[in-house]
Amino acid sequence: MTEAMTKKDIPTKGAILQRDRETYAIAPHIPGGFTDTATLRKICDVADKYNLALKITSAQRIAMIGAKEEELDAIWSDLAQNPGAAIGLCVRSVKVCPGTQHCKRAVLDSASLGLKLDRIYHAMELPNKMKMGVSGCLLSCSESGVKDIGIVGHNKGWRIFVGGNAGPRPRLGEMLVDNVQSEEEVLEIVAKVVDFYKNDPQQGRIGKLVEEMGIEAFRAKVLGTAAAAAGSAK
């Protein structure tokens, strides 16, 4: 077996082995996809220095492709940025739409809420990978309906979905609760979902757990019987 055939991803360096079985892709963390010109210039300078290709990803990051294993430490040192959680059993990403800060259609501030969720959960270790999406209106540009935890703003408050994914077996999330009135309440509910999932013995994604239990039982376990009854009645 050749050395190239034995190479693997290097999670500690945020490095994903590429098709050539020799080089790696990395992705600096860009919370919610919001960045600035200085950060972009640095990424471009490092890409030029190490001859890396760049790819905008669906997780609102910039993948830097073609890194040699022996250069990974130097690349991260030059970037002086944290890795995005592109691999591993953890919260991979919190996808965020422009929200009321920029978008004329947004009704709630998805950017504010999404960045708070990112600060709390990005890269948190879990039984399986998890993705979150926060959208400021029902158009759901962050694809919240196919996220493990999806949050959508509308005229009456926040709607929270659980159990979605867009993998080999796509699954639409199911509504956990609707008309949540504040960011603080959303954060409390998401914390309960994550805590319940983190302590459940099954090792699949959260959609598998919702399927096994049924959304009503899942809601009751996570929110409590009284809250679940109120949530399902909305």
Image (tube, rainbow, N blue to C red):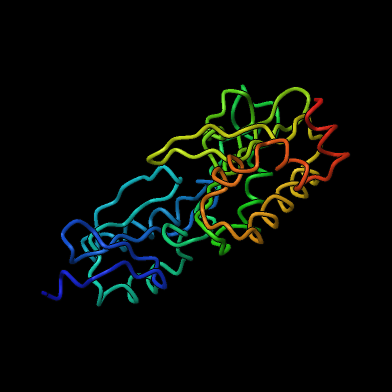
**Quadrant of the rendered image containing residue 214:** top right
**Residue occupying image coordinates x 36% and y 45%:** 56
Q: In this view, which residue lies farthest toward the front?
A: 212
Q: Position of residue 229 (x, y in %)?
A: 84, 33
**Nearest the camera: 81 or 207?**
207
Q: Is residue 161 above or below residue 191?
A: above
**Nearest the camera: 187 or 28?**
187
**Residue occupying image coordinates x 19% and y 56%:** 19
Q: In this view, which residue lies farthest toward the left?
A: 2
Residue 171 is left or right of residue 192, and the answer is left
**Residue occupying image coordinates x 52% and y 60%:** 90
Q: Position of residue 60 (x, y in %)?
A: 45, 45
Residue 52 is left or right of residue 170, and the answer is left
Q: Position of residue 58 (x, y in %)?
A: 41, 42
Q: Is residue 94 above or below residue 102?
A: below
**Quadrant of the rendered image containing residue 96:** top right
